[in-house]
Image (spheres, helix red, strand yellow):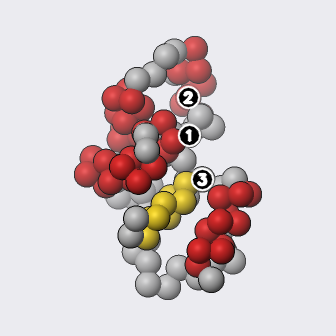
Amino acid sequence: MKEFDFTGFDLHEIKTTAITAEELEEMKNLAGSYETLFSRRAQNYKKLGLKDQQLSEDDIKNYILSDYTFLKRPVVVDGDKIFIGNEKKNLEALGQYLK
């Protein structure tokens, strides 16, 4: 992420200021589902036994709102474009978009 120039973007530090339900809803509308935004790498995912449960979209929404670690990061939103997560293909697409 350090190689990207985010000048002109509003950076939101979700560790100190939680995302709102409205912000999450906007991200969900761009991403297509809460599941797309959900991180299964969060420590609490295994700790809470969530991998053995069938989670609904509402469940996932509530987990993301209750603990920032459940949001796959980074999330970059620019107008109607959204880039989610740090997978190589996502970061490459983000890099192309920011050029």
Whether label 3 touches label 1, CB < 8 Å:
yes
Q: Is residue 4 left or right of residue 53?
A: right
Question: Which amino acid does the dot numbered 2 rest on?
Answer: Tyr
Secondary structure of the residue carrying tag 2 is helix
- What residue did someone put label 2 on? 45
Q: Residue at x 41, y 54 (%)?
A: 30
- What residue did someone put label 1 on? 39
Foreground pick, 63 / 22: 22
Point out residue 36 in the picture as x, y percentages from the top left corner: 51, 42
Neighbours of disc 1 within 10 Å: few (<14), some (14-19), many (20+) = some
Foreground pick, 73 / 79: 79
Neighbours of disc 2 within 10 Å: few (<14), some (14-19), many (20+) = some
Question: Which amino acid does the dot numbered 1 rest on?
Answer: Ser
Q: Quadrant of residue 14?
A: bottom left
Q: CA distance from mark 1 to mark 2?
A: 8 Å
- What residue did someone put label 3 on? 85
Whether label 1 touches label 2, CB < 8 Å:
yes
Of the two numbered discs 3 and 2 in the rendering, the one whose residue sits closer to the viewer: 3
Q: Residue at x 58, y 78 (%)?
A: 98
Point out residue 6 in the picture as x, y percentages from the top left corner: 53, 79
